[in-house]
């Protein structure tokens, strides 16, 4: 009761402060309107590829004013009339210094060049050097894609999801697990975006790889706390992945051949300096290897697995103020298993498809717009046959939506964002078919759930003083569950005997709510800052799962008249400091998160039970909480780059219908530590290493057993009351690079000069699990012998997936 009252008072005060501060800002802006100011605006590009630069700093050092380019490279800064020395800077790039005369508004684009680094030195690119301490962002980490390439990779495949799981506050359940877990949230509580389109299942190979091809990725940003108002619909995090726009200067080809898969990326100009394209494809050849190994006549002939994915993007600059983008992704996994002895076979195809069309418009020198149309499709099938009996299961999601975002820059100390978004959902939680020979079983009609989801938001970031910056936002979200839909009235233990039928577009249940957000940052004099944040989020989709692996037991469905939206809030405070001229970043964050309307399958329920009933009739509902501290140290410059992360945390759940006390979540980990670093030995050799240690996952095991009518019956202890052994692993890698230049003798000058090579290549050698740790995948109870003869033995067995695994990958670019 006290917590609820405190929460309501806090929300009221935040809303009141939000509107009061905006009124003061408007008054201040009005009183300052008499001052003559002019605006400098434009876009920042990479000089070699034409890619827009996210987070470049455009600054006027003399007056200590500056702004950063937005996610589309656009910047805007308004200053009093005058002549200024200005800089354009970005980590890993040469700084531009120019004199700007502001006597009228000026539109100016900048092209910045990558630095030519000294021998044996690495500069991590992809971020603003001072963002760690200067920005209001909390729980936000931007990953460097180039650094990811040098870290050890499982079977040589550079992987976004595996890399973010090395960050504090982010973990996986275990090897082969679906998704990732952020600050105690489940895998469904992460909003995964690829060029603004939602990716519902970001995993290949049952969770061992992600769907993101590193060759086509421009930036990776994860937000664990202090979620900006433009994002919503998920309680735990936002993983924002942006694809490259494509090189608009020249044709470029990149690729790689590894033990598991090969990939190829081609990019180049449509029209130089105006438009470009990029296409990227990747495919495994496990199926070809298995065909060679499993010969005809084998009991398992026909068993196979492969995945493939394809990404493409086009962009074109229509005018100096208008630019359009079209991007898409298509990925598919196909697993088949044949047991010819038992006449048993299984086929499991699943995959994602996304498409995004965007229009960037510079409305004027202070107002920027991004308008997007978005399509997402995800489906999962399970088909099996044994001795003539066929069983099939299908689950899928299809979304059609759009969004519009505006960014307004009144002055260098003030940035306003506002906009809205809408999605039309079509969920197919479970569709089951069954037949035996000529007999087709009645499994009911295909059950689909339809809904409208939308949101409006406004966010205001401004400086109250030079030291104190505030970011406040308010988001209003809603979800409307509509027909056609049939609600089955069920009583546990009884056959369905009643139903309610809703017609097409009939409103069944409407949910909505306000989601306040607030972050503040206070600068300290020693290149450090203190930050605090609070946010509230509503989530209108759910993932019901029994297994920790990516199997058809994972059922996506939206909020209904029974399954209410998940609601959560998070508060955090942290200390951030940069050391040694920004070469090192450090941070300590403490957080507390509360969640309600969480779901679990009830005891004994199975996904196939969805036949002739609704998925939410099989669920129970509860709440959760998570709290902890995260420590992070990252080195950005020098021979050695990388990071160390450590998390100490606790994650609990309370489901009255499962257990009458709080119990640890399945993925609760008290300690989670990771070390990832890269060492540049010389111009040809780079070494990488990753070490991870984590408290073992929880599980429920029997505490006693007895015999009943000759059968062994187990009595189970508290839910998730047992810990697996700790998980730890060391991965190593070495990468060899060819010489970047070749010698050329100039006959006229009689001098030998160095020219940049057009064809470049490198070889990566990785060792996964270098000391062959047998980490538990799962633990089960094993019984041997016969109780009637007195030789019954009961014990625990551990299954581990991966021993030490070496791999070699050849990468090339020209």
Image (spheres, helix red, strand yellow):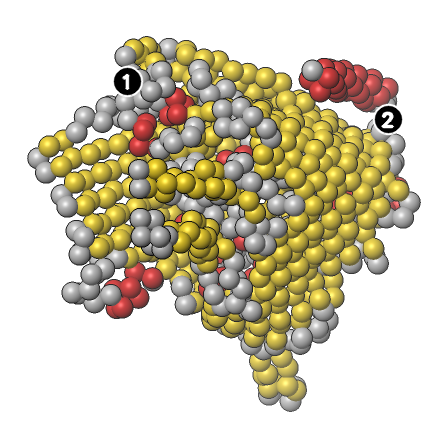
Q: Which residue is rendered at x = 44% and y = 17% of the image?
A: 562
> Front-most of 172 and 306?
172
Quadrant housing the N terminus: top right
The quadrant where residue 492 appears:
top left
Which residue is at 61% across, 77% downward? 684
The residue labelled by disc 1 is 495
- C-alpha gap between disc 1 and disc 2: 76 Å
Q: Position of residue 339 (x, y in %)?
A: 22, 55
Residue 704 is situated, as x and y percent measured from the top left of the image, at 47, 41
Residue at image mark 2: 35
**Front-most of 64 and 96?**
64
Which image quarter: residue 449? top left
Position of 75 compared to 440: left or right? right
Res. 122 mark = none
> Where does the image place residue 206, in percent across and percent down from the top left?
41, 49
Q: Nearer the viewer, residue 58 or 34?
A: 58
Find the residue positioned furthest to the right. 525
| Residue shown at 26% from the left, 47% from the top | 347
Q: Secondary structure at mark 2?
A: loop
């Amino acid at each position: 009761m006290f917590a609820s009252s405190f929460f309501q008072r806090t929300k009221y005060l935040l809303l009141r402060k939000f509107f009061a501060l905006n009124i003061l800002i408007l008054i201040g802006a009005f009183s300052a309107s008499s001052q003559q100011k002019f605006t400098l605006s434009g876009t920042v590009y990479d000089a070699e590829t034409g890619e827009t630069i996210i987070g470049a700093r455009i600054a006027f050092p003399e007056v200590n004013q500056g702004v950063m380019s937005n996610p589309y490279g656009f910047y805007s800064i308004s200053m009093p009339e005058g002549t200024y020395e200005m800089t354009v800077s970005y980590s890993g790039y040469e700084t531009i210094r120019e004199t700007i005369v502001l006597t009228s508004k000026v539109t100016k684009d900048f092209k910045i060049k990558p630095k030519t680094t000294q021998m044996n030195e690495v500069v991590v690119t992809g971020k603003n050097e001072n963002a760690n301490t200067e920005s209001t962002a909390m729980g936000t980490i931007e990953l460097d894609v180039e650094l990811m390439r040098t870290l050890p990779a499982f079977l040589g495949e550079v992987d976004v999801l595996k890399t973010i799981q090395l960050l504090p506050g982010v973990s996986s359940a275990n090897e082969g697990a679906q998704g990732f877990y952020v600050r105690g949230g489940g895998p469904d509580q992460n909003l995964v975006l690829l060029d603004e389109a939602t990716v519902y299942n970001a995993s290949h190979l049952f969770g061992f790889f992600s769907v993101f091809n590193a060759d086509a990725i421009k930036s990776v940003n994860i937000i664990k706390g202090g979620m900006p108002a433009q994002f919503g619909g998920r309680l735990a995090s936002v993983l924002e992945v942006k694809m490259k726009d494509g090189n608009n200067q020249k044709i470029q080809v990149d690729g790689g051949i590894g033990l598991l898969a090969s990939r190829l990326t081609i990019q180049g100009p449509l029209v130089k300096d105006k438009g470009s394209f990029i296409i990227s494809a990747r495919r495994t050849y496990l199926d070809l290897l298995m065909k060679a190994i499993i010969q005809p006549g084998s009991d398992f002939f026909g068993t196979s697995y492969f995945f493939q994915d394809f990404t493409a993007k086009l962009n074109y600059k229509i005018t100096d103020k208008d630019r359009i983008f079209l991007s898409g992704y298509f990925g598919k996994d196909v697993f088949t298993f044949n047991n010819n002895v038992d006449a048993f076979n299984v086929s499991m195809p699943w995959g994602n498809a996304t498409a995004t069309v965007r229009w960037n418009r510079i409305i004027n020198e202070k107002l920027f717009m991004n308008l997007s149309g978005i399509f997402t499709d995800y489906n999962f099938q399970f088909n099996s046959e044994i001795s003539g009996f066929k069983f099939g299961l299908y689950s899928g999601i299809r979304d059609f939506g759009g969004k519009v975002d505006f960014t307004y820059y009144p002055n260098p100390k003030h940035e306003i964002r506002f906009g809205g978004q809408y999605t039309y959902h079509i969920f197919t939680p479970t569709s089951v078919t069954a037949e035996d020979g000529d007999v087709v079983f009645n499994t009911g009609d295909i059950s689909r759930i339809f809904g409208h989801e939308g949101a409006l938001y406004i966010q205001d970031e401004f400086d109250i003083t030079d030291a104190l910056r505030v970011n406040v936002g308010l988001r209003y979200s809603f979800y409307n569950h509509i027909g056609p839909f049939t609600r089955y009235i069920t009583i546990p233990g009884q056959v369905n005997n009643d139903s309610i039928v809703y017609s097409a577009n009939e409103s069944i249940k409407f949910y909505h709510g306000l989601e306040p957000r607030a972050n503040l940052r206070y600068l300290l004099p020693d290149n450090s800052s203190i930050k605090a944040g609070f946010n509230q989020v509503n989530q209108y989709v759910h993932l019901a799962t029994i297994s920790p692996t990516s199997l058809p037991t994972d059922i996506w469905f939206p909020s209904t008249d029974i399954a209410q939206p998940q609601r959560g809030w998070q508060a955090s405070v942290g200390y951030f400091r940069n050391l040694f001229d920004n070469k090192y970043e450090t941070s300590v964050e403490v957080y507390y998160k509360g969640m309600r309307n969480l779901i679990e399958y009830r005891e004994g329920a199975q996904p196939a039970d969805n036949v002739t009933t609704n998925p939410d009739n099989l669920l129970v509902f509860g709440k959760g909480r998570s709290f902890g501290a995260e420590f992070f140290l990252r080195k950005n410059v020098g021979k050695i780059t990388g990071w160390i992360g450590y998390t100490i945390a606790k994650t609990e759940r309370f489901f009255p219908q499962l257990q009458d006390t709080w119990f640890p979540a399945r993925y609760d980990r008290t300690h989670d530590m990771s070390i990832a670093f890269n060492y540049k030995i010389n111009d040809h050799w780079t070494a990488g290493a990753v070490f991870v240690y984590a408290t073992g996952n929880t599980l429920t095991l029997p505490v006693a057993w007895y015999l009943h009518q000759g059968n062994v019956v187990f009595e189970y202890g508290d839910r998730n009351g047992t810990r697996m052994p700790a998980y730890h692993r060391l991965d190593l890698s070495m990468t060899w690079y060819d010489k970047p230049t070749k010698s050329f003798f100039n006959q006229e000058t009689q001098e030998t000069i160095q020219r940049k090579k057009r064809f470049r290549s490198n070889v990566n050698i990785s060792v996964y699990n270098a000391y062959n740790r047998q980490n538990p995948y799962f633990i089960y109870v094993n019984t041997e012998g016969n109780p009637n003869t007195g030789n019954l033995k009961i014990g625990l067995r551990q299954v581990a997936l991966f021993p030490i695994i070496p791999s070699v990958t050849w990468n090339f670019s020209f």
